Amino acid sequence: MGKSVVVFGLGQFGRSLALSLSEAGADVMAVDKDEELVESIAEDVTEAKVADLENADAIKELGIGNMDVAVVAIASNLTASILSVVISKEEGIPYVVAKCSNERMGTILQKTGADRIIYPEAEMGARAARVLTSNDFLEFFNIDENLCVVEMKPRKEWIGKSLKQLDLRKKYNINVAAVRSHHELHSSFDPDRPLKENSNLLIVVEKKNLKNLDR
């Protein structure tokens, strides 16, 4: 993945996101005021730091100026969320994502500089609906308004054939980013190797082309 991401707030959403980003190869700085939460994730991310996110100086002292992305996952604390967004922008972070619990909070954080607002509960509902209505989809994640990532089982007619033979990009307008086999995700895979039944595909696809995968 190669990006550096700072995650403010290690509640259920922030912790899960930090761990997933780290697993995907990102350099992750995880930040929270709760020392126990920080210690619990320290071995699984690049850096884990304790900071009072209601204190502007404490946020500045983290040294986040070289980060590519900031994720503000403190929906229960508007003051900390605002400071984290504002200072992330002041420090030069080009892309700031903020988790919000309601539209009013989302409007405030967007006006203070957040590039993207996410409402996890609403997005989880859409994601669950997409997975439940497909025979093959295992996971579904929005990247932005145009792109999404789908993890799916290979169709029966794909099993035993290689990615080169299937030529999925040409036939379905999709890009296979990785293959998961035996619970391990591999971004480097042999395009001539036949797919097995347990070779799940991680696919990047434009939303307009999802219909090519739905059955």
Image (spheres, grey):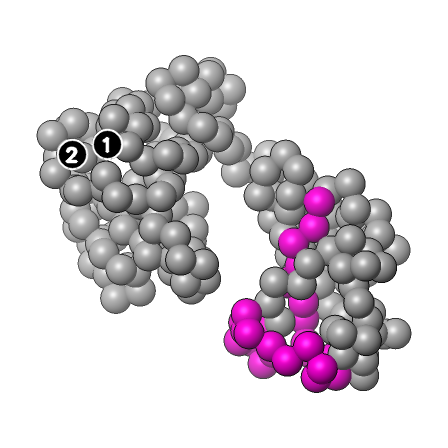
Going by the image, does 172 lie left or right of 43?
A: right
User: In the image, what residue occupies the spot 28% across and 24% down?
Assistant: 86
- Tell me the quarter of the picture where residue 99 sits: top left
Residue 124 visible at all: no
Q: Residue at x 58, y 81 (%)?
A: 182
Residue 215: image x %, image y %? 88, 55
Q: Hey, which quadrant is residue 146 in on the image?
A: top right
Which sits in the foreground, 177 or 15? Answer: 177
Between 89 and 110, the one lying in front of the other is: 89
> x, y (%) of residue 121?
55, 37
Find out whether the residues at labels 1 and 2 contact each other: C-beta distance under 8 Å: yes
| Disc 1/disc 2 C-alpha distance (Å) | 8 Å
Could you tell me if residue 115 is visible in this image? yes
Label 2 is placed on what type of residue? Lys
Q: Position of residue 28 (x, y in %)?
A: 32, 54
Q: Which residue is mark 2?
A: 60
The structure residue drawn at horizontal position 61% and vertical position 63%, both measured from the top left corner, is 177
Magenta span contains residue 100: no
Q: Which mark is residue 91?
A: 1
Q: Nearer the viewer, mark 1 or mark 2?
A: 1
Q: Is residue 111 above or below residue 187?
A: above
Say which element carries label 2: helix
The local crowd at label 1, few if under 14, some if 14 to 19, many if 20 or more residues have their Cα within 10 Å, is some
Q: Which residues are magenta?
A: 180-206
Label disc, if present, on residue 9 of the rendered structure: none
